[in-house]
Image (tube, rainbow, N blue to C red):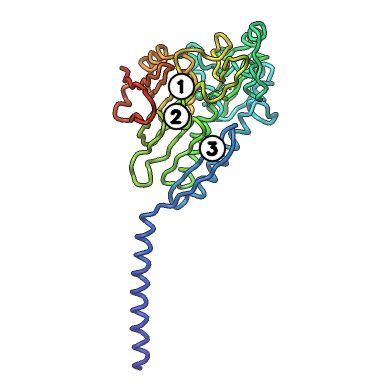
């Protein structure tokens, strides 16, 4: 009897001790949020995917998988891709996903508003310069003219069929488009959605010049995103503090080649067919929509300082950081409490624009 009651007390004690241990363990694990990080190579870019929370592992895997599938859909040289189907349609209608339809129409909005500064049908010109395969070449004016006449983004017919929820697109025969200027923006956006769906509490993806965030940092504070120094890519000119946002930079320093003492970079002025030449070294866009941010970063870089600021004043919906060849950092006024210059980054002058 006595031995039995002794045993019972021991059980109770053990249960209490166990309960205490469980609560201590739970408290400890509350402090350290689980983090998972994955690095992948896709769309010609090293990408870092980071997620936080109990589902962090599933979240980074899901993000990687949507990026790979978008890459397969957008690669214009892959015969099974949607881009290839569009470019070989010979003027016929091509059925496209709602995602491709959204990309095409975002690009059309920016095309219309920027007077064609962003033009996905500039692809034949990008190809002739060798930016698609690294076989760089400086084309003659005649060669450029022959490709420039193939631009036809204004002739795109994008049709939606609400009854079935499907879409189709057509271009004149001989048109070739590429999603190079907006693909990574859409990939970042999809990666963040995939992380959210997988149950991540917060996360951040960095795809070259494209950064997009999910929620806030695990400690509840805002994310700090660096803005690269175009004159020294190992450094940064400043940082922005943001919540859930896309931050996308286009710059002449990101992809270029040198020939005969001249430098040729990958962002093309669709008017001339040559690399953009204006006062800018980079254009960064900060807005919620990753695809729009990417479309705008390319377009604003092409437009140059004055016309980019006019675009922002007219249409708004985003904030912008322009870095000029004369070391000016021009921020739109919504960034006054968001942007912090890096004191160690040379003599940049910050200006806020109305
Ligand atoms: P990155 O690809 O370095 O992130 P961007 O988003 O600015 O930079 O896109 C540049 C890419 O878009 C080029 O590599 C090229 O494939 C394509 N491109 C270049 N100029 C234009 C343009 N004016 N309009 C649309 N696409 C362009
Ligand atoms: Mg872009």
- The residue that disc 1 covers is 282
Q: Is residue 229 left or right of residue 76?
A: left
Q: Where residue 35 sits in the image (x, y, percent)?
A: 45, 49
- The residue that disc 2 covers is 228
Where disc 2 sits, the SS reads strand
Task: Please tell me whether mark 3 or mark 1 is closer to you in this view.
Answer: 1
Residue 273 numbered mark, or none: none
Q: Residue at x 44, y 27 (%)?
A: 229
Where disc 1 sits, the SS reads strand
- Depth check: give the residue in front, 210 or 95: 210
Q: Residue at x 63, y 33 (%)?
A: 72
**Cα distance, mark 3 to mark 1?**
20 Å
Of the numbered discs 1 and 2, the one sitting upstream in the chain is 2
Of the numbered discs 3 and 1, the one sitting upstream in the chain is 3
Q: Is residue 203 left or right of residue 331?
A: right
- The residue that disc 3 covers is 47
Q: Would residue 18 be visible to someone looking at this image? A: yes
């Amino acid at each position: 009897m006595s031995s039995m009651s002794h045993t019972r007390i021991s059980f109770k004690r053990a249960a209490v001790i166990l309960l205490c241990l469980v609560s201590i363990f739970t408290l400890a694990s509350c402090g350290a949020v689980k983090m998972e990080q994955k690095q992948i190579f896709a769309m010609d870019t090293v990408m870092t995917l980071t997620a936080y929370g109990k589902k962090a592992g599933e979240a980074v895997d899901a993000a990687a998988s949507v990026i790979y599938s978008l890459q397969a859909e957008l690669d214009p040289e892959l015969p099974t891709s949607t881009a290839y189907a569009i470019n070989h349609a010979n003027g016929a209608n091509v059925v496209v996903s709602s995602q491709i339809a959204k990309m095409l129409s975002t690009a059309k909005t920016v095309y219309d508003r920027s007077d064609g500064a962003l033009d996905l049908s500039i692809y034949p010109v990008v190809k002739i310069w060798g930016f698609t395969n690294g076989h760089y070449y400086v084309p003659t004016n005649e060669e450029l003219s022959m490709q420039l006449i193939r631009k036809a983004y204004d002739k795109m017919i994008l049709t939606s069929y609400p009854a079935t929820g499907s879409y189709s697109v057509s271009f004149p025969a001989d048109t070739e488009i590429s999603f190079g200027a907006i693909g990574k923006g859409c990939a970042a956006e999809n990666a963040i959605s995939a992380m959210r769906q997988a149950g991540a509490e917060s996360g951040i993806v960095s795809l070259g010049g494209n950064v997009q965030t999910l929620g806030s940092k695990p400690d509840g504070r805002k994310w700090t995103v660096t803005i690269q120094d175009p004159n020294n890519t190992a450094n940064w000119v400043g940082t922005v503090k943001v919540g859930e946002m896309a931050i996308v930079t286009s710059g002449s320093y990101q992809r270029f080649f040198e020939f005969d003492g001249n430098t040729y970079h990958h962002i093309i002025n669709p008017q001339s067919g040559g690399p953009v030449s204006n006062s800018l070294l980079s254009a960064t866009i900060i807005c919620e929509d990753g695809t729009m941010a990417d479309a705008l970063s390319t377009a604003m870089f092409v437009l140059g300082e004055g016309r980019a600021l006019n675009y922002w004043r007219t249409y708004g919906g985003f904030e912008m950081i322009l870095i000029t060849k004369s070391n000016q950092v021009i921020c739109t006024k919504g960034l006054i409490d968001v942007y912090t210059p890096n004191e160690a980054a040379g003599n940049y002058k910050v200006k806020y624009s109305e």
